[in-house]
Amino acid sequence: MKKVKMIMAAVFAALMFTGTNAQTPKSVEIEIKVSSQCSMCKENIEKALAFEKGVTKANVDLDKDVVVLSYKPAKTTPEKIRTAISKAGYDADDVPADAKAYANLPDCCKKPADREFDHSGHDH
């Protein structure tokens, strides 16, 4: 009888653990539209996200102006990630770039309308 109770307890524990994992994925992948302009933007955004708690991978696609990233939902949220991108000086979906951080970006990383010089030959 004692063995049966132990087996039942083990099965119950396994079911509880499985149920919890099914509800909260360990990692989620999302795309966020960003206002990247050049390879320096790519570096800046990826660096900012490398320090963001819960972000496990980030890659800026300059052709599409999106960052594809993986994050742990137990540690962060898409809103916090967008805020981190904004604080680095870039738009993130509907979250505008932090004005002070944007002003401190190199000229090549600013939107074309805000640039002092023509960087049309700059790598994108």
Image (tube, rainbow, N blue to C red):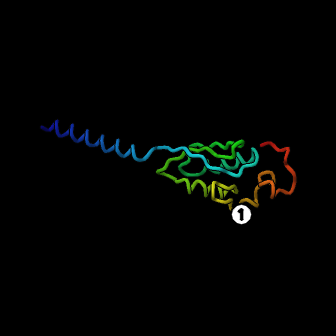
Q: Position of 60 compared to 119: left or right? A: left
Q: Nearer the viewer, residue 100 or 67?
A: 67
Q: Residue at point 53% right, 46% down?
A: 71
Q: Which residue is mark 1?
A: 99
Q: Residue at point 77% right, 43% down?
A: 124
Could you say which quadrant of the image residue 64 lies in?
A: top right
Q: Residue at point 31% right, 45% down?
A: 16
Q: Position of 110 compared to 65: left or right? A: right
Q: Position of 31 compared to 108: left or right? A: left
Q: Residue at point 87% right, 51% down?
A: 118
Kindly give the residue lying farthest to the right in the view shown.
117
Kindly give the residue lying farthest to the bottom in the view shown.
100
Q: In what element is the residue under mark 1?
A: helix
Kindly give the residue lying farthest to the left in the view shown.
1
How packed mark 1 is, by other alpha carbons closer than 10 Å (few <14, some 14-19, many 20 or more), is: few
Could you say which quadrant of the image residue 121 lies in?
A: top right
Residue 95: percent from the left, percent from the top? 63, 59
Residue 65, placed above or below residue 79: above
